[in-house]
Every structure is written in C-alpha cells, then in structure tokens.
Amino acid sequence: MPSFLSLLLLSIILATVSAGSDYTERLLLRPLPQSALLASFNFRSNDSQLSFEEQNFRYFPRSLGQILQHAHTKELHLRFSLGRWDAESWGQRPWNGAREGGTGVELWAWVEADDEDEAFSRWLTLTNALSGLFCASLNFIDATKTIRPVMSFQPEGDHSNAPNLHLLHGTLPHEVVCTENLTPFLKLLPCKGKAGISSLLDGHKLFDASWQTMSIDVRPTCGIDGHCTLEMEQSVDMVLDIDRSKRPRDNPIPRPLPIEEIKCDTSKGYNAGDTCYPLDKSSEPSWNLTEVFGRSLKGACPLTDQEGENAETVCINTPPERTVDVNTTGSYIESRAVGDTLRCYKLPTGHDFDLNLPSQQMTTGLVLPSPPLSAARSINGHGQERGSIQTVITNPSPTSAVEFVYLESLPWFMKPYLHTLRARISASPENPVLETYYRPAVDRLRGTHLELRMRIPAASTLTLSYDFEKAILRYTEYPPDANRGFDVAPAVISLIDPAASDGRGQYVRTTSLLLPLPTPDFSMPYNVIILTSTVMALGFGNIFNLLVRRFVGAEEVVAGGGGLGALVRGKIDRLKGLLGK
C-alpha cells in the first residue's frame, strides 16, 4: 500500500510537468526454439528542454550529461555484451544488430575538436569519466586499443551544427560484465528500476542468460524548425533459458526428475522400469514473467506517455493460437497487430502486472526472420611464431547481393601480413574487395586498423584469410593468467543498405578470439631468488660462525668437571677473567 501511494503521489505531482513528456519504454518478448525467450527492453527519452549551459536536466541524467559536455562529445554509443548470438537457431539479431556490441565493452563516439591530438585528449577524458560512472575498466582504452574508423560507422544524429567531429572507437574484449555495470545503468532511468519494465531487471537473471547486451546511445535530433534536442536510448537484450530461469534460487543445481515423472519412449527395446529414453517435448513450456525474471513487474512508470501509440509498454510476439493470460488487479488495455501475432498491453499504474503462458500443444511453428549475413571467424595454424585468421561470411539470400564493410581492430602484438590477404568467393572468380583501408601497428603505441569494403553475391560464401606474426612481450607486460591467452576483439560487419531510413544501420559481429602468445617460464625468477638466498644464507652463516664462535680445548671442559653445572661454572670463570677480576 505505501508503494502504491508513493507512485500515485508521484504521478499527481508530475501530471502538469509531464504533460508534454517524451519518455517511452517498451518490452518485447519473443519465444525462441529450444525453450528460449528473447526479452528486449528499450527506454527512450527526448527532453526538449535540456540545456547544458543552464544545467537544466529533466529526463536526461545529469551525471551523463555533464560528462558529455566536459568531453565535448556530440554522439555516444556504449555497449556491454556477454555470450554468443546463435543465428542458426534464433534467426535475425534484435534491432538488426544496431544495439549490439562485441564481447566485453565496446565504445565509439563523435568528439568535437580542432585536431586529432585534441580529439584524443578529450577521448581519454570521456573514457576515464565513463569508467567511474559505470564501474567498468574503460580507462584501459588507451592509444593501443583506439582506432578511427573510416567506413564502418555512420552518425545517427544530426550534426549539421558541429563540423569538426572526430570518430574514435575502442574495445575491451576481456572485460567481464557483471552487476556492478547494471546498477549504474538502472540509475540513469527516470524510475530507476522501481516501476515500469525496468523493475524486471534482476542481475541474477540477466547475467545468467545465454546471451545479453546492454547499450546506451546518445545522439542529437533536430526538428524542422531547427531546434535540436539530445535523445538518449537505453536497451537491454537477453536470451533466457525458460527451464533454467524457472528453477528456484535455493535449488541452483538441476536435479533429474524421478523416473516415474518422466515420459519415456516405450518403443525402445531397452525400455524398462529403471531404464528410460525421454520423449521430446512436443508442447510449449509454461512460464510467466515472475518465474522467468525472478520478480514481478511493478506497474507502469508514471513518467511514460499514458496516451497514444507509446502507451503500450509490454508486447509479446506469439502465434495467434497461443494462450496468454493477464494477472493484475489494475485495469489494462490489450491490442493486437501484425496479423494477431503481436499482442501489446498498456500497464496499470501502481499495480503488479504479470503474463502467464500455460503449457500448450502448438500446431503453428515459430517464424523467425533469417539474418542478412552469417559470419564465423577463427585462428588457424600452430606454433608460437606465426598463425592465420580466417573469416567465412555467407549470404543466405537467393536473389540479392550484399555490400558491407568489414572492420578489424587487432592488438599491436598481432602483426598481420597484408600481402597475404586473400578474399575468395565460392564458385566465382570475382574479386569481392572494392576498397581497402589499412593502418599498420606500431609496437606499444597503436594497434592494427583494417577496413575492407566488399560485395558478396547472392547465395554465396566469402572466405577471407591472412597470415600474421606473434610478437614477444616483455615479462612485465603479461597478465597473471598469461597461459590463458590474449583476447582479440570481434570483427564488425556493417551492411550498406541505401534503403535504410532509421539511420541505425545493420551490424553483424563475430565472436572474440583467444590468441596464445609465447609465454616465458615465470618459475625461473623464483628459482633464481631461491638459489641466491640459499647461497647467501650459507655464506653468511659460515662467516658469522667464524667471527662469533670461540674455540677451546677439550681439557678445559674436562678440568671443570662434568655436567651442565660445570659448563656454567666454566663460562662464569672465563667471564671473570675477561673482566680482570
């Protein structure tokens, strides 16, 4: 009851302020094969009264706004990602890959500056400030991990009033994304995870997902009258295993069911009372929001637009025959679109909301859109000196060719040989490379930057390969887990689509790579220290004994009598003799 009164009071106070509110949020649920569920959270704010000069912040978070103002950043894109998107089973990526990043942390931004040195200085200011804001290691994005893409990324905002812009891009593929990054992410939202769809974001469920990504995008938008505002969009996408998510927190280890509760295939010859071959599940599993996300949805956020097309907050994409029950004590509105496959709900304010999907036998299968491209990248070769990179890109379309830009950012200790670059198309002598940009690495100063503009025909496979040489690091440059290998950032494939109108673009990212480097025997310094200490102990001990120990004849000890008392008396007599008594 107190939470309901507080939300109601907040909505009354903001009734006049948020009459022209432009903050929206939406949750899209899409079941996937093999009991998987794609959940896409999207939060967008567009504050027309935002003014950095007057420090007037309403929906835009002040903490992030002051960082962008101080670093002269006009457009920002930040990604936190974990896992791998299974395109073969899950189909096309959410948002066409535009809100997805490579494994770890990926950041690119347009910075206003007069020259490249000033732009890089402001870039370091931006990365260090964002590192403290999001509790991440963004301050490790230095010159060796920074590139300046030429063809891969296009601005999403309107930058007609800022001509001197510099694009910088950095990655941290070894960064581990965890709850420490989710907490500041939620604090940037107006309702801060207390109401709205953000109340479902639980770190235990989010980082237990098969694949997840968090993104923050800031861009300027200008109207017809020339008035520009700063739009901020936050997205969280995750693929959850329904069976794993429904398991209670006090039973984290899955235990097999008793054999009497398992449906067995009795046609097997070895079927018996203690032997069972489980039958495949032919029905969709039952689930609800509370079970999957571990907490209930606390109604609508009072700052969202309660009228119009943006009022529908939760949407689920299922076949029309799928039963979806709503569990709430408040009033809600349900609508259907896209051939009854998309059901959207307007949430009640101050009341819990839950969707319940019972177990059901389905006759209509899931229809998943196919991705425009699929890519696989690997390291080949053996030995500690050289290797090769091979990327296989497939165009599944039987009719349309695809033009794209292939971007690789390699560490400085991975030195490619550009003359070994080979791009081959299956069953075609055509050269797919249209344009090449290459900036070689400089040891300990910058990494390798490679961009290729290519075209792949319909129903074809492109194989891209080149050789590289491994550098030998100084022993102080190796991390504590040196034998694990070094992470290489994923390649970024940006599709060139002249018909795209949203300005986001389409992207495909490969998985990150693990590069083994020649590793010295770190036990040798330990052996040297032990040997040196032993020699010094033996030498010092012998010299100390020679300087301190006093040798006496055997007759002196016998003359004094035997036993401990005689030995003590002999010491006392000797001491008296030294003192002259």
Image: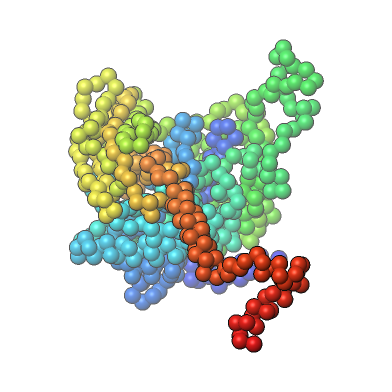
Residue 297: give x, y in percent of width and height.
62, 54
Frontmost residue, 318 versus 188: 188
Residue 489: give x, y in percent of width and height.
37, 45
Left or right: 398, with 34 as reference point = left
Res. 405 visible in picture: no
Image quadrant of residue 348?
A: bottom right
Left or right: 73, with 311 as reference point = left
Q: Tell me which colouring the rendered structure shows.
A: rainbow
Total numbered labels: 0
Residue 52: give x, y in percent of width and height.
35, 72
Left or right: 401, with 366 as reference point = left
At 53% across and 62% down in the image, what residue appears?
541
At 49% across and 54% down in the image, what residue appears?
530
The outermost residue toward the top is 269
Frontmost residue, 379 versus 365: 379
Q: Against 354, is 515 above or below?
A: above
Res. 139 visible in picture: yes
Frontmost residue, 258 versus 568: 568
Residue 429: give x, y in percent of width and height.
21, 22
